[in-house]
Image (tube, rainbow, N blue to C red):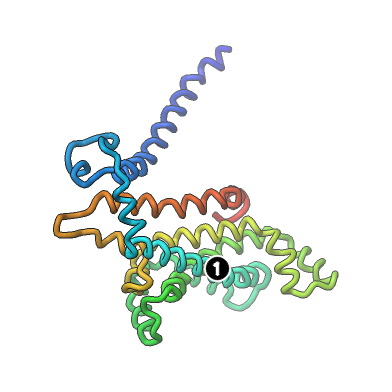
């Protein structure tokens, strides 16, 4: 009993620290939601913990102005395209790194990771000139392909860790049973690493969703993403804080939904894969 009482204060202190830390992390999100229901005059006026006169005007602006809601549509289009392309390309590449040994394999694997380490600003000008020559500026595929530069290496790195955990005897058994490689890969191998595919797709989606520099550089009007549109809320009257806050709240929602649907895969990824 004495031993139990001795450690009880430490447990309570840990609970208090954890609660305060979570509240600290959630404070910016709460304040963003709080601002999204206020008028600019109230935001720039007296300090209030909640809206004195809640309004949906800011959200109404976003859902009725094509320049705003088209930004969300554009972002979702190129992010989904990039996620599909990145995972589709990374799957066979990761399988090759996992199952085969060839000249320069470690150097090639490291070179892929260096592309992920480099800042997007390094590649902004080359991409702009290249896509201008091919007429791809202001298209969804331009941004999707540009984001493959750092998402494909990430997906390869994650998937290779999952694939290395699958015994090679499964491959050999499938070949003995008469499976062709495409059939084996789709029917047997991918289900075994489904959690890895989910984790890779999640990170590709999130990194592409939040990237701004390349998305803004390679688009002008038709494919402009919401992150770029949010930077032009300055007018003669000043910064439109309410609309900007509402746009920020709506920008968080897709990421939250993706996290909700792949939460089990992410948990397995932390336990089994290279995450």
Q: Position of residue 111 (x, y in %)?
A: 49, 72
Figure quadrant of the N terminus: top right
Q: Residues within 10 Å of mark 1 (few under 14, many from 20)?
A: some
Q: Position of residue 76 (x, y in %)?
A: 45, 63
Which residue lies at the image location 30% right of the left edge and 59% below the top edge? 230
Q: Nearer the viewer, residue 174 or 219?
A: 219
In the displayed orientation, state which residue is furthest to the top.
Answer: 1
Q: Position of residue 36 (x, y in %)?
A: 31, 46
Report the residue marked by disc 1: 84
Q: Is residue 250 left or right of residue 262?
A: left
Q: Position of residue 145 (x, y in %)?
A: 46, 74
Residue 150 seen by the camera: no
Q: Quadrant of residue 103?
A: bottom right
Residue 209 seen by the camera: yes
Which residue lies at the image location 50% right of the left edge and 51% below the top edge? 257
Label 1: element kind: helix
Up the image or down, 252 lies above or below 144; here it is above
């Amino acid at each position: 009993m004495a031993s139990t009482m001795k450690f009880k204060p430490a447990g309570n202190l840990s609970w208090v620290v954890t609660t305060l830390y979570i509240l600290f992390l959630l404070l910016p999100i709460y304040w963003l939601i709080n601002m999204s229901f206020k008028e600019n005059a109230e935001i720039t006026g007296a300090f209030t913990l909640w809206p004195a006169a809640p309004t949906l005007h800011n959200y109404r602006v976003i859902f009725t102005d094509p320049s705003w809601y088209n930004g969300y549509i554009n972002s979702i289009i190129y992010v989904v395209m990039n996620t599909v392309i990145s995972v589709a390309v990374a799957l066979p590449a990761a399988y090759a790194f996992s199952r085969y040994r060839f000249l320069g394999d470690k150097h090639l694997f490291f070179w892929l990771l260096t592309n992920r380490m480099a800042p997007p600003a390094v590649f902004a000008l080359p991409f702009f000139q290249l896509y201008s020559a091919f007429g791809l500026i202001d298209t969804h595929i331009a941004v999707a392909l540009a984001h493959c530069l750092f998402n494909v290496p990430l997906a390869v790195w994650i998937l290779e860790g999952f694939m290395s955990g699958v015994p090679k005897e499964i491959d050999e058994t499938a070949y003995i049973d008469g499976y062709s490689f495409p059939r084996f890969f789709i029917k047997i191998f991918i289900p075994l690493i489904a959690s890895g595919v989910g984790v890779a797709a999640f990170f590709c989606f999130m990194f592409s969703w939040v990237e701004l520099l390349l998305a803004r550089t390679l688009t002008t009007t038709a494919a402009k993403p919401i992150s770029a549109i949010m930077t032009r809320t300055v007018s003669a009257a000043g910064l439109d804080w309410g609309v900007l806050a509402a746009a920020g709240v709506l920008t968080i929602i897709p990421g939250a939904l993706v996290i909700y649907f792949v939460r089990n895969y992410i948990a397995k990824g932390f336990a089994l894969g290279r995450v």
